[in-house]
Image (cartoon, grey):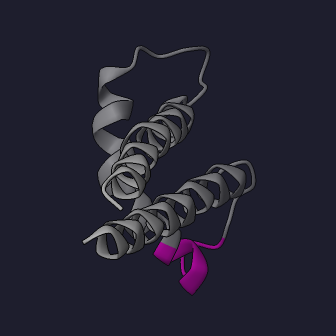
Amino acid sequence: MSNILLALARLLYILLEAYFWIIIARALISWVSPDPYNPIVRFLYRVTEPVLRPIRHRLPATMGLDLSPMIVVIALKVAEWVVVDSLRDFAVSIR
């Protein structure tokens, strides 16, 4: 059971880390005017917009800055620290 929980913790860490970098790439791409028909740009928007849009609508307008990627990045790191580390610690403790 311990090995399954450790594998689950590793998988969750990889998924959270990958989404973290996808959000960072989306934020960086938003600084330039990307080609909306580029497959990479379309992928980034399709994967991140369902998460960013609700946050963007709840945040007040701040001098034209979109702070939603920063909120999502912070939430991802907190989830990583709390959920993944707790799952890893629990797996180690039941060995």
Of residue 10 and residue 50, the one placed in the foreground of this image is: 10
Name the image quarter holding the N terminus: bottom left
| 57 is within the stretch colored magenta | no
Position of 32 with respect to 60 (left or right) is right
Quadrant of res 41: bottom right
Q: Which of 69 and 42 is in front in this view?
A: 69
In the rendered structure, does residue 39 fall within the stretch colored magenta? yes
Q: Is residue 39 above or below residue 65?
A: below
* Residue displayed at 30% across by 54% down: 50
Q: Residue at x 42, y 47 (%)?
A: 89
From the viewer's perspective, is residue 94 above or below residue 46? above
Horizontal relation, residue 30 to residue 4: left or right: right
Q: Position of residue 79 (x, y in %)?
A: 41, 41
Query: Vertically, is 64 above or below 36?
Result: above
- Which residue is drawn at the image coordinates 34% and 49% (left, top)? 90
Find the magenta span and give its range.
35-43
Left or right for 3, reference 74 = left
Q: In which quarter of the image is the C terminus?
A: bottom left
Residue 8: x, y in percent? 34, 69
Camera sees residue 79 = yes
Image coords of residue 11 (percent x, y): 42, 72
